[in-house]
Image (cartoon, coloured by chain):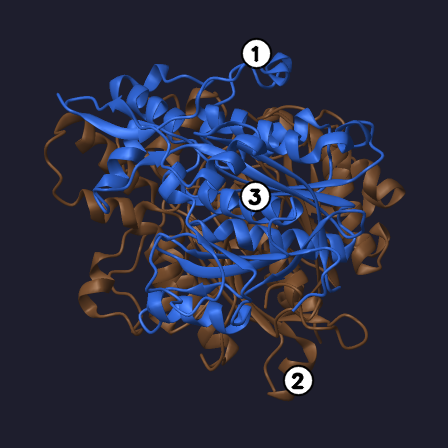
Chain colours: A blue, B brown
Amino acid sequence: MSAVFIHGLGAVSPAGWGVDALLAAAEKEQPLPVQTLARPGWAKTLTVRSVPPPASRLEFLAHPRLRRAATLSQHTIAAALEAVGADIAPVQAGALRLGVIVCTMAGSVAYSRRFYEEVLREPATASPLLFPETVFNAPASHLAAYLNSPAINATLVGDGGAFLQGLAMAAGWLAEGRADACVVVGAEELDWIIADAVRLFRKSAVYTGGAGALYLKMHPPARTVLSAVTDAFSFTKSQTRTTAARQVRGQLGRGRADELLCDSEADPSAWPDWPGRRLAPKTIVGESFAAAAAWQCVIASGLVQAGRFPGASVRVVGANQQAIGARFMNAEQPAT
Amino acid sequence: MLFPPPKPAGAPHRVVITGAGIITALGAGWKANAAGFRAGTTAFRPVTLFDVSRQRAKIAAEVELPADLPATRLSGKKSRRLNRAARMLLLAAHEAWEQSGWQPDEPLPVVLGTTSGEMSLGQDYLRQALHSPDDFKRQATRVVYYQVQKPAQVLCDAFDFQGPLTIISNACASGANAIGHAFETVRSGRARRVLTGGYDALCQLTFAGFDSLQALAPTPCRPFDAERNGLTLGEGAAVLTLETLAGAKKRGAEILGEIIGYGAATDTHHLTQPHPEGRAALSAMSAACAGAGIAPEQVDYVNAHGTATPQNDATESAAINRWAGAHARRLPVSSTKAGIGHLLGAAGAAEAVVCLMALRGQWLPPARSLTTPDPACQFQLVRQPEDATVEIALSNSFGFGGANASLVFRRWV
């Protein structure tokens, strides 16, 4: 197994609904406008970026499972459906076994907060409608239900690096024959409780929500391949963030002058000798953990697919767990 | 590299277990738990960790944590600061690690399952954010330590593991899916060894959540009883060390058992209720056996998911009946949740250890709370302690959201 082909991309972000909006924002390299979010108990507000409302009602909300689904699930499903594209019908018909992997760090924070507020007010009457939506794997479950997909399904929880681990897990499922195709989604949800928490660590961070998705199969035709996912180098007592990031570089290699580095940080002192162009999508869209890592991969893969770069590497130095990298190449270029 | 993985050398590796650690309401460690499971001891008591006076159910299987943690690379100060989930995980991992005889001499993948990490800290965070919005004291620490990856990171620091760290959160199947993923990682040659398992601690949010669904029984749970009235929550952690058979033999390790199959499927019927026919459960069991290269007739014991909710047990009974066919009437089945409650993300891992205990000890763990077996069960419900020949055991774990997983274990002699 030397390559896995990228058959589709999906995104819901502050740039809008769809990959085109995200790629356009990335190409402009201008920070998207910010909004304010009320924080209970405060006169001042939190600065955030929110996903704009969809242009029209989302058709999948008509599914009985999804009427009350959290925003996290809605974004997950929208991004996944865009990525799976023309294969939705064969999956729903049972002709294609679709593995589903959803990656998140904070999960369904809005419903969790609402449910626990109800518990604090009166535990005897806390809503049974809210609680199931607080479970980490609710988005993956809803997605599988909408696609009528009984194949293997997993939710990975961790910092942004979990999304790249998800890509490697999907490649493993494809190789083991557990699925014919896999969709990997990174998703996070905007709520004051998480925006407030992020502010405790980085005052300048602008939190956002949304989702990004990659659709993988082991065979062409596709214009982009996933050619590498490095090991995930954990942050431990004996391995700092800097050391972990260096290890990623050791596995990804020096890079090429025509290769994009899609980075989780806008820090030129990291990998200062990277020979090609660099892009840090978080400076444009904001911080969103697993969703942000997914957007990095969507942008990297999308720009390779569009012929802008023959290859693109992704570097994720996560919030508190791991550093990990990936490389996407034009399917006609030899992997390096 | 996680991808592409190293080229496999020939046939897939056989995967063996060389260390196991467990902590449940029955006690800390293999010995205490084996004695409890073998006797069918129940460990439920009134909840003391948080206020349940306004809840329908008021009991759970709380763990009595030992006062001291084993000596590790963590400083005494850091050890004392650890919360409930991290303490349980550390205790189980320490036991497994000691038993395995492993040394931290190379990156060790850690694959764990959990549903809520250290959620009690998340609760504290929200309470303070709501009630004292300008008081940030200890809030940053709560944010860091409530996250599901933090207890696992503490584990890595305690034993000098370098990872990578993978956390699977597939609701109540998390622990089984984590072990299944770890099994595939070793079997395929992506790693020589993996530390895996699951952990979950009781917390008010989860307790109130299951209570809101009226899924909790006001009395100790009675899996597969015709009069069952819901599940009882528990807490705990269980950890296994998996490695290639060749590796274990080379270093002369004691082998506790072999994992030979893993199946997973998704039930798309409903977010919290399984399909009445148990199609995904059947798929998971069938896939696990197919992967193991065995027929249902070769399975000597099934550790059922058996939550004791009306829906789960009906569905699982239907699935086991169909999967086992004529073999069902001779097939011993029990749910050890009758003794320790539902450990959620740790359930699949704890029940994997129970299967190992049964294989090692050649006995069947009974569910003694069972008084009136559900007539839908065509299989033999284990109600009293008994010795038995157990060569192969299968463990089921089914979760919210339809995550279904089955693991198959073989006795090692």
Q: Residues within 10 Å of mark 3 (few under 14, many from 20)?
A: many
In what element is the residue under mark 1? loop
The mark that comes first in sequence, 3 or 1, is 1
Measured Cα–Cα span from mark 1 to mark 2: 60 Å
Quarter occupied by the C terminus of chain A: bottom right
Q: Nearer the viewer, mark 1 or mark 2?
A: 1
**Subunit ID for the residue under disc 3:** A
Q: Residues within 10 Å of mark 1 (few under 14, many from 20)?
A: few
The residue labelled by disc 3 is A298
The residue labelled by disc 1 is A57
The residue labelled by disc 2 is B249
In the image, what residue type sits under mark 3?
A: Val
In what element is the residue under mark 2? helix
**Residue B209 x %, y %:** 42, 26
Measured Cα–Cα span from mark 2 to mark 3: 45 Å
> Residue at image x 60%, y 24%?
B227
In the image, residue A24 sits, relative to residue B367, either above or below, namely above
**Residue B93 x %, y %:** 43, 65
Decide: marks 3, 1 in contact (CB < 8 A)?
no
In the picture, measured across the screen, residue A21 lies left or right of residue A3, that is left
